[in-house]
């Protein structure tokens, strides 16, 4: 099956700093999503981005499907950005995916005031 | 109005018991899923249903039995609970299978603790 690797595993920032999170995947995808799991455990949809670039406020994401990676940019970070960021993909690798999202291991972001 | 809801939010029970987790979505989606998040935060799919039909069963022990009474509901019943079943269980839904191309939306999770 498809492999999903995220980097860095941990990231510590001061409020106001910018950051880039990376997601590499081992095969072609037809769905790529970024999630934020907040300290209360909720999984919040950030982006649905199998290709191209999207922006939502201080967050933006770019997926280069041909090179099998996606980037999540966080600008002017705030303490409320703390949590775990997951990349997840659906792929036809190894047969029909039927919507099976394969998750990366996550990036733990801590933003200090 | 919560799009994907789960009950209960927390579940503490003893080994050997049988328990159920309920999930409902009001998004009009055709496909629903169960995912498990372990103590290391790793998320993995367990099941998916499309129009009440089981599509994915990811080698989950048959103590776990999903049931979909209609397109808007997918419940998870667990028999003979074991310590290793302790985890957070997330329900999700998407518009359609279509090769998995549609965005999935997750419920708030159910934290199951088996003592």
Image: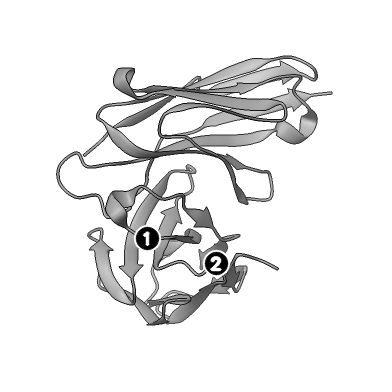
Identify the element where label 2 is drawn.
loop
Residue beneath the point at 61% across and 26% down: A60
Q: Nearer the viewer, residue A71 or A81?
A: A71
Q: Chain of mark 1?
A: B
Q: Nearer the viewer, residue A50 or A44?
A: A50
Residue A51 place in picture, x, y as percent: 41, 29
Query: Quick check: can you spot residue B63?
Result: no
Residue beneath the point at 38% across and 79% down: B68
| Residue A9 falls left or right of residue B18 | right
In space, the residues marked 1 and 2 are separated at their CA atoms by: 12 Å
**Circle nearer the N terminus (1, 2):** 2
Residue beneath the point at 49% across and 43% down: B41
Residue B2 sits above or below residue A96 on the image:
below
Residue beneath the point at 26% across and 31% down: A28
Q: Chain of mark 2?
A: B
Q: Nearer the viewer, residue B72 or B56?
A: B72
| Residue B113 falls left or right of residue B95 | right
Residue B97 place in picture, x, y as percent: 32, 58
Q: Which mark is residue B96?
A: 1
Question: Which residue of the protein is positioned furthest toward the left in this rendering?
Answer: A94
Q: Which mark is residue A39?
A: none
Disc 2: which residue? B27
Question: Which residue of the protein is positioned furthest toward the bottom in this rendering?
Answer: B69
Residue A90 sits above or below residue A25 on the image:
below
| Residue B100 falls left or right of residue A17 | left
Question: Which residue of the protein is positioned furthest toward the right in this rendering?
Answer: A113
């Amino acid at each position: 099956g498809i492999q999903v690797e995220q980097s860095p595993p941990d990231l510590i920032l001061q409020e106001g700093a910018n950051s880039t999170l990376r997601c590499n995947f081992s095969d072609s995808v037809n769905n790529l999503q970024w999630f934020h799991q907040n300290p209360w455990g909720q999984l919040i949809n950030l982006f649905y981005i199998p290709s191209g670039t999207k922006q939502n406020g201080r967050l933006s994401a770019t997926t280069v499907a041909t090179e099998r990676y996606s980037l999540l940019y966080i600008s002017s970070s705030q303490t409320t950005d703390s949590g775990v960021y997951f990349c997840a993909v659906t792929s036809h690798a190894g047969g029909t995916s039927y919507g099976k999202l394969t998750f990366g291991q996550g990036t733990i972001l801590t933003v200090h005031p | 109005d919560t799009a994907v809801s789960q009950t209960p939010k927390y579940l503490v029970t003893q080994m050997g018991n049988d328990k159920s987790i309920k999930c409902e979505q009001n998004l009009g989606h055709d496909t629903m899923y169960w995912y498990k998040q372990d103590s290391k935060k790793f998320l993995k799919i367990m099941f998916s249903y499309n129009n009440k039909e089981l599509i994915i069963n990811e080698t989950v022990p048959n103590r776990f039995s999903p049931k979909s009474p209609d397109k808007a509901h997918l419940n998870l019943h667990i028999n003979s609970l074991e310590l290793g079943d302790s985890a957070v269980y997330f329900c999700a839904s998407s518009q359609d299978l279509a090769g998995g191309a549609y965005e999935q939306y997750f419920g708030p999770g159910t934290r199951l603790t088996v003592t």
